[in-house]
Amino acid sequence: MSGYKIETLGCKLNFSETATISKLLTRHGFNAAGEGEVPDICVVNTCSVTELADKKCRQHIRSLVKRYPDALVVVTGCYAQLKSEEVSELPGVDIVLGNEQKLDIANYVTQWMADHRPAVAVTRQQDIRRFAPSCERGDRTRYWLKVQDGCDYYCSYCTIPMARGRSRCGTIASLLEQVREVVRDGGKEIVLTGVNIGDFGKGTGETFIDLLRRLDDIKEIERYRISSIEPDLLTDEIIEFCAQSRAFMPHFHIPLQCGSDEVLRLMRRHYDRDLFARKVQRCKELMPDCFIGVDVMVGSRGERPELFEESYEFIASLDLQHLHVFPYSERPGTLALRIPYVVDGRTKQERTARMIALSDRKQREFIERYLGTTRPVLLEQRHGNAPMHGFTDNYIRVNVMPDESLVNRVVAVRLNHLNEDLTVEGEVINN
């Protein structure tokens, strides 16, 4: 019986889809390789959001080939979708599958076992139509439920529509069945993930708020989080529902990318600063304890020095808690390449450092407000000698004294001390 090993790079959506790949291989008679076992099959689920991501994928593939020279190597995901020829030419790669072919991975592996013939199967962007359901737990307490895939926005800097295809989703009924599987597995928290989840419902006649309401009715799930939602799709109705819901946590991640309206127009984003600020304000009005994270891209084409300063000041003025900061990366085939003003690498690094420092300051100030208070924390399984930890409802990471009886339980924890790494030392006050 052949054993497989799956390596995943990139976003939480990829990690969710890895669970589906694993199930498909298992159903076809392949077993996951155990700790320390040499796998017969290596699958790499790749990312291609930046040039650095491509580089990491190549390094990872080469490392696997070197470690397991006799294994069948399958590469899938966004890097395989966008650069299939480049991937197929990497030494040791046997099968290259685009995102549409992820669902057929077991068939390709079985065929290779029969004839050892290399295969490259990548569907054109406009023909990517299937929605692959997935719900992944990994080694965490939280589950990642994929509710949507693809994107119709075509922002000027982004290759995701080329890699993932048009927006599509599962039906509410099919997603609820997956949630019931999580319930049967004892899960307590689910994170909703996708490429553009606020676009949920295209092709089904359903809406994202419909999905949220139905999920909230499943009483066995104590917590839901929305992984990321575009500001123009984060409606007041959604915010108001989350504020009064039973199980949706006071926690949002809202992509901003830049705080300059001129740069937002160059990026072909679907909102301006005023709309974004109003969404943040509404969240805080209804959920004062809400943790808000945002994506911020620095050094994009067209981001002149005065526009970066404008962006920095705007972001500094908002009641945000965390910035996911990353430098702009040139991507082949994107409209951004037509923008003439280019930011040099050193300037990108300097801007990245300033934004990260701003993020650390904002997150520290937010956490300090809650020191000495008690918050509900869902505790996770301890790994090795690492502290036992969990997250508050408003997404503060808290360490507590190890107690295996508390794993996967929501308990009251007093937040006592803030560490340099922005985690908090806490004390369980009831059991």
Image: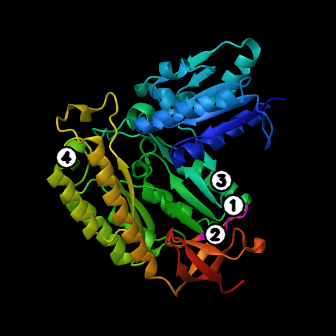
- Asked whether 330 or 247 is in front, the reply is 330
Membership of 217 in magenta stretch: no
Say which element carries label 2. Answer: strand
With 226 as the anchor, is 105 left or right in this view?
Answer: right
Separation of marks 3 and 2 at Cα, in angstroms: 17 Å
Q: Residue at x 57, y 23 (%)?
A: 96
Q: Residue at x 46, y 38 (%)?
A: 53
Say which element carries label 4. Answer: helix
**Residue type of the residue flagged with mark 3:** Arg
Q: Nearer the viewer, mark 2 or mark 1?
A: 2
The x, y position of residue 366, in whole percent, is 41, 76
Q: Which mark is residue 137?
A: 3
**Residue type of the residue flagged with mark 2:** His
The x, y position of residue 211, in whole percent, is 49, 57
Separation of marks 4 and 1 at Cα, in angstroms: 44 Å
Question: Which label's residue is closer to the chain start, 3 or 4?
Answer: 3
Q: Which residues are magenta?
A: 384-390
